[in-house]
Structure formats: structure tokens, C-alpha cells
Amino acid sequence: MDLLRFITAGSVDDGKSTLIGRLLYDSKSILADQLAALEKQSKNKEDGEIDLALLTDGLRAEREQGITIDVAYKYFSTPRRKFIIADAPGHIQYTRNMVTGASNASLIIILVDARNGVVEQTRRHSIIASLLNIPHVVVAINKMDLVDYSQDRYNNIVIDYAEIARTLGLKDVTYLPISALKGDNIVEKSTSIPWYEGPALLELLETVQLEKDIDLERGRLGVQYVIRPQSNDLDLHDYRGYAGKIASGIYRKGDKITVLPAGLTSRIKTIEVGGKEVDEAFAPQSVVVQLEDDIDISRGDLLVNGDHLPQVEQEFEVLLCWMDTKTLAAGNKYLVQLGSRTVRGLVKEIEYKVDVNTLERQPAPAQVGLNDIVKATIRTATPLPFDRYTDLSVGGGVILIDETSYVTVGACMVQ
Amino acid sequence: MSKEHNYQLDYLDQLESEAIHILREVAGQFERPALLFSGGKDSITLVHLALKAFRPGKFPFPLVHIDTGHNFPEALDFRDALADSIGEKLIVRKVEDTIQKRQLTEPGGKFASRNALQTFTLLDTIEEFGFDACIGGARRDEEKARAKERIFSVRDEFGGWDPKRQRPELWNIYNGRIRKGENVRAFPISNWTELDIWNYIRREKIDLPSIYFSHDREVIDFEGQWVAVSPFIRLDATDVVETRRVRYRTVGDMTCTAAVESSASGIDDIIREITATRTSERGETRIDDKVSEAAMEDRKKNGYF
């Protein structure tokens, strides 16, 4: 059984929470007492239906205002797969929350209201999906019951969206007609939509091919912690293990490793997974590696396997999503964190702003505000090994941290 | 050598790897972390994960138990035996001592729970040892407010959680930088469900305190829940004490944890029962969550785990 992390994009009006509620409810992941609590709270019970949206809004303020403010994580599983849903708000003022939820997702469900078709919000969510490099996109055309399950209506929306997908270069896009409220094509195939021949949403989620999402060619292993037992036990006396999680690639005993940013090389002496020695390990396993040579390696260093080395630079271009209420201006200094490596850096130049609704480039603002996405150049105090985010996302996602409040203020995709 | 291999990780391996990564981030980023250990299945799982994360080295943190004085004796015995067998340091601080020192008022009533008071002891302990990060076994599937909490959750100097000012947490990058007085609660098994924990315990053959398995116990029926008879609850004339075959699905205080009727004596039976059950873990066994819709959110804002 494997694991799929996905994000749902859309606002309450699109039926996003209803969709998630429906998935959990129809796959029997909501338990009796949770349902009872839900029934008690359901304010707008139309023909006795419970308000499934209440299931996902966890904070008091959210329930009071009837909106989703923050990302919530929901869990369910079927005999085939375990699922983790990042339930993110869809309004433009919560772009940062959506970026956050999207950063770990392998799939995004973009909800389109069949009555309205492709709208500004659809475009924005698709742009975020492409910026964050989410491998699989599912366009769920919802509220089909309100357009009499019209195949023409559905086909027109598919044609419209295909144009967006083409412009953004989205590769794996699947479409399906649903009604989250009525349960059409969510868990069971709908009898109201006989012209649709594809699978229901749940089956789609269960069968999306995930094997190729992880790169096994380029080895990237960031050192998080050095294990030195300092024991009198002779076997352990010289033990020096580099602990970290393999972000991509396969690591085998005897492989030649390049340590970055220093550029030194050595070979793998041992690999351990969970305290047991193994011949090989692969992403996303957490491992401990010992090397043949005694070289100076510490937290934040990158053990690279294979011929495809990352770049090691002090200056690089990024697409940056600003996440703080304090504004960003060129020249500001921040801590720059990539994986377990943190260096000091500054935002040297802001080239342009991306209109998240149209992808058009706009002149760079003097002050970059909350939820703005800009193209910028970052300069760091010491060299940083990185990959281009579109090439190898695990090696190209960077956060900016405010040097005084220590709050995470920006998310960068290295270009 | 080049035999067919599909480099695919089982979901439990993925969850395990994520948890180990988080534990090592805590070790790498903080000066004085601690692992909060209760003797329950979630924190026992955390200890097992820490062994995988740090052996053959020592844990870079002590185990810390906030003892309410209302714990199940079986859980306390288990705690001491486990700490002893793995050779790691265990720090115990008692709510009883905090009550004396700070002249706190003991709650009254039939089930006088010290659940709220343990926050005082926890904050005192954090201050006493200067802990900058506390690792805990909370899971997002337990409760709606927990579903919204970050893996690295920054708390103010009163331990308070501000759900509106949470740091964005992207990819697998954890920002553990804090200002003086603040500390972090880190939750490595955030993405595990109750069933994931049980499946993992079965797979890894992890030992648990005996109260998780069915046994005969004197209980009273309180609004449909079985509560163990102990010196810490008030028996009223109307209570009928009876012996039932029960097990615990969660292990908290004897005053606020209810037992479920069960004959499940082995882990396979338990997993079968949990898969079939129609009531959530906290709903079935926690007397303290029923107070209000936002009970957990409010406790967290006040420094609770």
C-alpha cells in the first residue's frame, strides 16, 4: 500500500469542503460520534442533509465565519492507498496558505463550478499548481446536477481548461464531471452521467501512477545530524554516521559521493536504515551513511550521488511567494534555508511581479506585499548547492526567514 | 545483482521516514530538546522511532514525564522499565508538587481531572531545564484543532498556541528558530492515524503496557462510558460497581480516560476492532473533550500540548 498526498483547491462556494466531506463520508472515514457532532452543528440543513463543510473547518473562527483560513490535513485510506489531504483555502488573500499546502502535494484537485466554467480563480489555482510543480492535476467539474448533467457544458469547460493547461505546460491533466453535494462520481460512478466513461474520483486517486514522481537518477542527501556514539566499544570507537533523508536517487555501498559545497569526494562504507545495515537505500528513506574517508562534514552539507551535480552558487534567481504582512523590498536581508542548510542572504533585485490570475508580468513593486509572487535574485553569504525547482523540486525549494522575528516570510522556487 | 526492484516505499515506511527526519531536525536545530513521554502508545512509538533515528548514538534529549498522580500504575511501571532497558535518561516531574508549590486549586467533582493542571507542571519543567523544544506524540487525526497545527509549532513564553499566527511550513523544511522565552512543540507523527500507529506497532513488534489489552477491571457506567474505579474518582450512591472485560484505547489519566468493553487480547484482535468501530478514539475514551466544540483549541491556546 502506498501513500498519496493531494491538495484540493477551491473556495467554499465551489463545494471544496463538501467534496472532502463527501470523500470521507462515503469512504466511511467519518465516525459516528464525529457525524453526531456535525449534525448538531449543521445550521443550514436542506432536506435533512448535513453540512459536510463543517467537518474540515477546525478553528472556531473558521466555523463562525464559514471560511477556511488555514491548511487543514485530513486522512483516509482504502485498501489500495493511504491518502493525506491538504485542505487549503482558495481565496486570493490566502495564496500563501495554498502555496504551503501545495508544496508537499503530488496531485491537485481543481474544482470548477459547471455553471460558471473556467474563472479567474481556476486560472490562479492552476498557476500555483504549475509554479509548485505538482505532477498530477485533476479538474473536477462540479455541480453538474445544477446544469442538468449536460455533456455539452462539460465539454466546453474541458476545451477551455485544455488551453490553460497548454499555456502552463501542465502535463498530466484528467477531467471528470461530479456533483459533490449529490455524490455523483465521487466514490461511486454516477448513474446520472452515463456519457462519462472514466473512473469515479476515488478510483482515479487510487490508481494515479506515482512511481515516476520521485527522481531515482540524481542522488541528493542532506546531512541533518552527525551520529558519534563516542563509546568505548571498539566497534563504535571510530563510528561517524551522517544521518539524513534521501531526497532523490539511490545510494549503494561503494558509490562515489561528492560532498557539497566543499566539493570533496569519498565512497560509501556503510548505509543503515533504522539501525540495520543495507546494501542500498533510496528516496524517500531516512538513512545513516558512513564514508571511507575521514573528511569534515556537518549538518547542512549535501552528499551527492551520481554525475548530475547540483549548481553551487552564491547568486541565483527565484520565483518568490511573499508570506508576511511586513513587506519585502530589494536589499532586505534574510536567513535562507534549503533543507537543513541555512545561510545568510539578501534579496538583491526584484525583476517583476507575476499576476497570479493571468501569469502576466507586471512592473516590480517597490514594496512586495503578502501573497505577491515576484521574480527575484538572491545573493547568499556562502555558496549554496541547489537544483532548478522545475528540474528537481526537492533540491530547489527554499524558505526565507526574518532575521529578527524568525518567522518564515517567503517561499522560493529556484529558477 | 540487477534483480527487479520497484523502488517504492510502503506507506508505513514513508511515515516512519518522515518522523525520523523530523526527530533529526529537532536534534539538529535545538540546544536542549526533550521528548515528552506519557507511557501511552503514541509516545512509545516515538521512542521506537528515536531509536531508529539516533542509534548507535545516544538520544540527544531526555525523556520527560509529567506525572499527574492519576496515572495508571501499569503505564508508570512500563515507563520505568522502558527507560531502563534502552539506557536513556528519564525526568519525572509531578503535578502534586506544582499544586503544593503554587497553591493551585484542585478541581472538584466526580472525575476531578488534573488534565488542566499538568500544563503548569509542564511549563515549570520547561523553565527548570531550559528546554527549547518538546517532542510530542500528538496526531492530526485526533481532533480538529490538531489538524491545523504545524509540525514545528512555536509557543509563546506561556506555552500558548496562536492558531492565527502560525508559520508557513513548506516542503520538508522546518524553521525552528525562536526568540528568547519561546519554545517549540514538535510533532513527528502528525500525519499518522490511530490505525497507522497500531499497524506500525504490530509490524515492529513494539511492546505496550498491559492495559491496552483486554483484562478484568472494576468499572462504573458513566453516561455510556466505562470508567475505572480508582481512589481518584468519587463514587456516588447511585453508582453500580461491576467487573467488566475491558481494554484501553488511549492511556491518559484514570479520571478522564474511559475503557472500552473488549475481549481483544492480542494486537490482531485490536486492529480488527478498531477497523470495525464507528466511534473515534477521543470520542470513545476521553471524558475531557466533550465539554465544548473547541475544547482542544482552547486548551492548546493555554499551553496544553
Image (cartoon, rainbow, N blue to C red):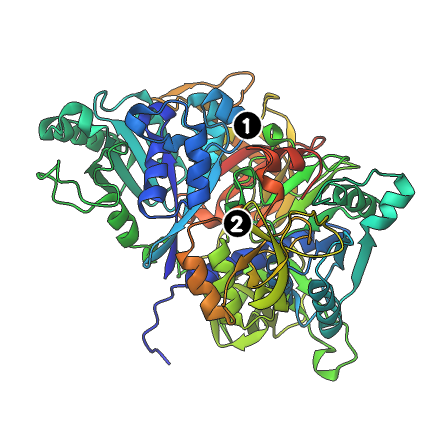
Q: Which residue is drawn at 59% across and 72% down?
A: A275
Label 2 crowding class (10 Å Cα cut-off): few <14, some 14-19, many 20+? many
Task: List x then y, in percent, for residue A203.
Answer: 25, 50
**Closer to the camera in the image, A363 or A207:** A207
Q: What residue type is labelled 2?
A: Glu
- Indicate left or right for B183 with A321 as reference: right
Q: How far is disc 2 from disc 1 in space, using C-alphas?
A: 23 Å
- Indicate left or right for B15 with B176 as reference: left
Q: Can residue A306 be seen in this view?
A: no
Q: Closer to us: mark 2 or mark 1? A: 2
Same subunit under labels 2 and 1?
Answer: no
Q: Which residue is drawn at 73% across and 71% down?
A: B81
| Residue furthest front as drawn | B237
Where on the picture, by quarter, is residue B118? top right
| Disc 2 + disc 1, Cβ < 8 Å | no
State which quarter of the image contains the N terminus of chain B: bottom left
**Closer to the camera in the image, A110 or B206:** B206
User: Which circle marks residue B248 in the picture?
Assistant: none
Q: Mark 1 lies on which chain?
A: A
Q: Mark 1 points at which residue?
A: A60
Q: Which amino acid does label 1 sit on?
A: Arg
Q: Residue at x 32, y 29 (%)?
A: A15
User: Which circle marks residue B284 in the picture?
Assistant: 2
